[in-house]
Image (tube, coloured by chain):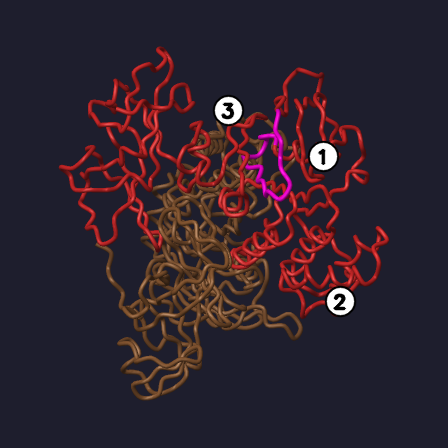
Chain colours: A red, B brown
Amino acid sequence: MPPGRITLDGIGHSYDAPGKEYALQPMHHVWEQGVAYALLGPSGCGKTTLLNIISGLVTPSEGRLFFGDRDVTYLPTEKRNIAQVFQFPVIYDTMTVAQNLAFPLKNRGVPGGRIKARVGEVAELLGLTRELARKARGLTADAKQKISLGRGLVREDVSAVLFDEPLTVIDPGLKWELRSKLRQVHRALDLLMIYVTHDQVEALTFADRVVVMKDGRVLQVGTPVELFERPEHTFVGYFIGSPGMNLLSAEVRGDKALIGNQEIRLASGYPSLPANVPIRIGVRPDYATLAGRNEGLRARIERVDDLGRKRLARVSVDGQKLVATVPPDFAVPGEDAGVLLDPRHIHVYANEYRVEGVAR
Amino acid sequence: MKECALLPMKESGFGGSCIRGRDTADVSVAKAQRRAFGLELRLEDVSYRVGEDMHIADASAQLDAGSMNVLLGPTLAGKTTLLRLMAGLDKPTSGRILLDGQDVTGVPVRKRSVAMVYQQFVNYPTLSVYENIASPLRVARLGKDEVERRVQKAATLLGLKPMLKRMPLELSGGQQQRVAIARALVKQADLVLLDEPLANLDYKLREELREELPPLFSETGSILVYATTEPSEALLLGGRTLTLWEGRISQIGPTAEVYRRPVSLAAARVFSDPPLNELSVSKGGSVLRALDRTMPVPAPLASLADASYRLGFRAEDVHIVAAPSDHTMAFAGKVTVTEITGSESFVHVDVGPETWVSVLRGIHGLEPGSPVVVAIDPARVFVFDETEKLAAGPALKRAA
């Protein structure tokens, strides 16, 4: 069994009495060596609790945690063989950049020659080579956080590297650089990485697989493309994408959906939807296009946002709000317009969960 | 309505007294007053130095009543310093600050009508949410009924009604920041300064509050200044944008215009996300030299003098193309990373010593290491001269 695999075997946590008010609902997941995972969700969703269980800061009230074959549920952090990067830089000002990077290796008695090679490699990956000899004091917050990332990545023998919102303090421009560096590093180093964030762009661009959480529950684990194209829960649709997925109450009959009193065609049929639960259709703003007033759904334009590379129209369809993409060079009509929904990208949700359609 | 309704706004500009004066005043009255008296904040060559360090250099700007002004710049550009100068928390080393034509340069913040919201949630931990919101009105000794009316209205607008009796620390971060915003709102200050107010909130909460904020304050007629590091946030807020770079205001104008026609390399860099792609070129006669290659001079540069230029172009204006021969400005490169958000794919490409980002609509999984040809659309390029000023660029097209 690869050493980098993490198994959450029925892991759950309640801060009060066991079984009462779960901060984290019992779950079963296996996370593999060499894969980058993001734990994504709003404040209070349980992502930090889960990270703390993996790092050993919190002992779960239920279940067992394995690193490879080893049960680490009750092991303290320092015996877990993990590296961590926090929201704010944790480095020694009086040391040089190289000494900072070498610190975790030196602590573990790695031979000098090996330290030098590894520090050189990580510095190269992060673009720190030219700074190696200088003292950390006086570096900008961004540069310091880069060193923190380097310290997290420098050990080769770790079971996992945990990142707790590491780019929060970084300027947008540098975020681009650091994010792409992290991805390159991940490719080069073959480590299991777990990255906690509330920022869906960071999660989607960093991770191979994103774990979307809400209210202590994992709602979906998937590749960025899966989460975007096929959200299994309305919350995933809403939380992924900016703005999120449009969700409209509808009456679905076979392969038709009735929104208010307007009918649209769906790409599949839905012959056996459960009764007496809320039914909604979901379609991303990318697949809803503003059109002339006699095309598609009748809509009233409330606002058009010019976002530089694209324009988004906020409209209302029989009282329900919807965001549609304005095609380039499209002359936006006054108040009344139409909205075209791409049937291949419309999903049907019964009681917030996606229902698979039946091909016609 | 007592003194304030009758007195010009300079009175309110100076005093806590103005709130008292507006006993029965309605928000719309305040707004009408501000507009009628042409409330404006003017900075004239404002500089601020600490020892040898120039923190703000020669800032000049005029901000009007009821306007949304975005202060856009990276960390350490001087955003917070400039806000503090506007507020009267710090005094400029040189230059003047005028409110409604009156010099208020040396007037301290407590004698001005200013409300501020910070990145960190600042509330009184021992006061209830209600009293937190009411606090500036209590200081101004407003009548009980008026306090009640304004607090209830602000609480309704910000969705805080169910938690007025609770303590701030029992609330989520988003709710705590709403309390701080409500407090700024009830004050009906002439000047409302928001210093990255959403930076500490969850991504989705940011989206929601960002939409709610501008209309809330535009109703009061206040001059609104909103500092942010994020170009996308500036575009969403609209209004006017001031780009700030190393303590200097590099450009002021309507937000979409500043985005589409940055007047300097500094302004273009501040207002690009992904970061601005750049390329050094030199023009000699009909030949353009770039990245050790020569090519015919594309149209936008044709009328420029022979010299070296720095080209700036955004991610949406770099295209990954199949046939280089169809493009005057095409270069061979190698993909380093592709980032997919779903709506868009960001392809990072190394081209010679430069790294460019190209944004494609939808999902495109270009593998790292793949060789690609990238073409720049010459009609979309900003050309900066050796002083980093805009020498040529796409004309502004009015949005339909």
Q: Which mark is residue A135?
A: 2
Residue B122, percent across and down? 60, 42
Q: Nearer the viewer, mark 3 or mark 1?
A: 1
**Amino acid marked by disc 2:** Lys
Q: Quadrant of the C terminus of chain B?
A: bottom left
Q: Which residues are magenta?
A: A28-46
**Amino acid marked by disc 1:** Gly
The secondary element bearing badge 1 is classed as loop
Query: Marks 3 and 1: CB-CB under 8 Å?
Result: no
Which residue sits at x=35%, y=61%?
B319
Q: CA distance from mark 1 to mark 2?
A: 38 Å
Q: Nearer the viewer, mark 3 or mark 2?
A: 2
Residue A59, percent across and down? 75, 28
Q: Which residue is mark 3?
A: B162
Q: Which residue is mark 1?
A: A68
Query: Marks 1 and 2: CB-CB under 8 Å?
Result: no
Q: Pointer 2 indicates a residue of which chain?
A: A
Front residue of this view, candidates B4 and B366: B366
Position of residue B306 relative to residue B242, above or below, is below
- Inspect this view and state whether residue A199 appears: yes
Judge left or right: residue B341 versus residue A360.
Answer: right
The secondary element bearing badge 2 is classed as loop
**Amino acid marked by disc 3:** Pro
